[in-house]
Image: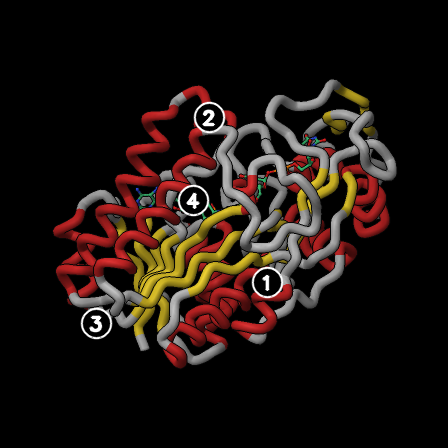
Amino acid sequence: MNILLTGGAGYIGSHTCVALIEAGFTPVILDNFSNSQPAVLQRLAQITGQVIACETGNVLDTPWVEDVLRRHGIAAVLHFAGDKAVGESVAQPLKYYRNNIGGAVSLLEAMQAAGCRTLVFSSSATVYGDPASVPITEDFPRRHTNPYGHTKLVIEDMLAAMQTTEPSWRLGVLRYFNPVGAHPSGLIGEDPSGIPNNLMPFVAQVAIGKRPFLNVYGNDYPTPDGTGVRDYIHVQDLAEGHVAALQALLDQGKSFTVNLGTGRGNSVLEVVKAFEQASGRPIPCQMAPRRAGDVAQCYADPALAKTLLGWQAQHTLADMCLDTWRWQSSNPDGYK
Ligand code: NAD
Ligand code: UFG
C-alpha cells in the first residue's frame, strides 16, 4: 500500500519512512528540501535496502500534488511538511501562515480531487500553550502563544470542520511532545541549519565541541531543580506511533486526536547529565534568563494513544541521548 509522506525527507518523516517499510507499507516522499537534504535518500536506501520514490516539489502546488497522488495510487497521506521554528514564526508570521496553513489547504484540496481521504497530521503539544497542570490530556484547553502554534491550532480546526461536512474523511491528529534521538544506525538524525533552537541538538553540538557551552534558560521555574521540564520522546517511538495511527485509521475508519509522549517529564539539567553519561563528554552550562514564551512544565498523559492505537513509547532518556550522540559523532556536519 502506497503512503505519501509530505516533508518525508525531514527529521520525523525520514524515521517514519523506515518504520513504514518495516511494517510492509511503501512510502513515497514529497519534499521541496527547504529544510532537509537530498542526501537523506541515500541513507534511507542504506538502512532499508530499498530505493524510496521521491517527488521533489512544493505542497502548495495543488495540481501537482493531485497528480502525485494519482500517479502513485496513494492510499493515505502523512502530512509532515511545514515550517517549525517558533522564533522565526514571530519574526516572519506570513511565511508560517502561507506555508503551514496554505500547505494544508492545498494538500486537502488535492486529496479531495484525487479521492484520497485518509490523513495523519503532525500537530504539536504547542497547542496546549501554558497548561494549567500536568500531565496534559487531549481535552485540555487549546491556546497559542506564537504564530507557529496558531497554524497548528487552525489546521486542527480546519480538519474538524472538514470532517463535519464530509464524514468519510479518516483523520489522525498526532500532538507530538519533544521529539529527540536518531535511528540506531547513526545514518539519519536531526540536522538543524545554523544554531539549534532546541535543547537536545544544542547539547549534542556542545558535546562534539562545536559550541562552547549550553545556555540554561531559567533556573527559577517552579520545578524540582528550577529548570524547564519537558516530555522528550524518541523519534523511533514517534515513527512507530505514525504506523499505529495509520493502521488504526485503515482498520477502524474512525478519526482521532492523540498525544504522542512518554508521560515522563525531564528537566534541562537531567537531560544534560544523561547526555554527559551517554557521550562521556562534559557539557559546560551557563545559567541564563528565561527564554520568552517558555513554559515551566509540559508533559503528556499518553493513555489515550495506548487505548486507541495500542501504542506506547518504549525508549528511555538514556536511549535518546545515546542515539543522538551516535548520529552527532558520526556526522559532525549533519548530511553535508
Ligand atoms: P523538518 O523541518 O525536519 O521536516 C519538515 C520537512 O518538510 C522538511 O524536509 C522540509 O523541506 C519540508 N517542507 C517544508 N515546507 C514544504 C513545502 N511547502 N513543500 C514541500 N516540503 C516542505 O521538521 P520535523 O521536525 O521533521 O517536523 C515535521 C512536522 O512535525 C512539522 O509539521 C512540525 O511542525 C511538526 N512537529 C515537530 C516537532 C519537533 O520538535 N521536531 C514537534 C511538534 C510538531
Ligand atoms: N533550553 C535551554 N537551552 C537551550 C535550548 C532549550 O535551556 O539552548 C530549554 C528550554 O528553555 C526548555 C527546554 O530546554 O525548558 C526544551 O526546549 P526546546 O526548545 O528543546 O523545546 P520546547 O519545549 O521549547 O519546544 C519544542 C518545539 C516546539 C513544540 C514543543 C512541543 O520547539 O515547536 O516542543 O512539541 F511546539
Asked whether 42 or 300 is in front, the reply is 300
Q: Which mark is residue 269?
A: none
Residue picked out by circle 4: 36
Q: Position of residue 256 (x, y in %)?
A: 44, 64
Q: Residue at x 27, y 59 (%)?
A: 164
Which sits earlier in the primary sequence, circle 2 or circle 1?
2
- Local SS, label 3: loop
Residue picked out by circle 3: 73
Residue 244 in sight from this viewpoint: yes
User: How far is mark 1 from mark 4, CA to CA?
Assistant: 18 Å
Residue 260 in the figure: left or right of residue 222:
left
User: How far is mark 4 from mark 2, CA to CA?
Assistant: 17 Å
Q: Is mark 4 within 8 Å of ligand 1?
A: yes
User: How far is mark 2 from mark 1, CA to CA?
Assistant: 27 Å
Query: Above or below — where is 15 with respect to 38?
Result: below
- Local SS, label 4: loop
The nearer-to-camera label among 3 and 4 is: 3
Q: Residues within 10 Å of mark 4 (few under 14, many from 20)?
A: many
- Local SS, label 1: helix
Q: Amino acid at mark 2?
A: Glu
Q: Position of residue 219 (x, y in %)?
A: 81, 27
- Local SS, label 2: helix
The image quarter containing residue 120 is: bottom left
Quarter containing the N terminus: bottom left
Residue picked out by circle 2: 88
Which sits earlier in the primary sequence, circle 2 or circle 3?
3
Q: Is mark 3 within 8 Å of ligand 1?
A: no
Residue picked out by circle 1: 236
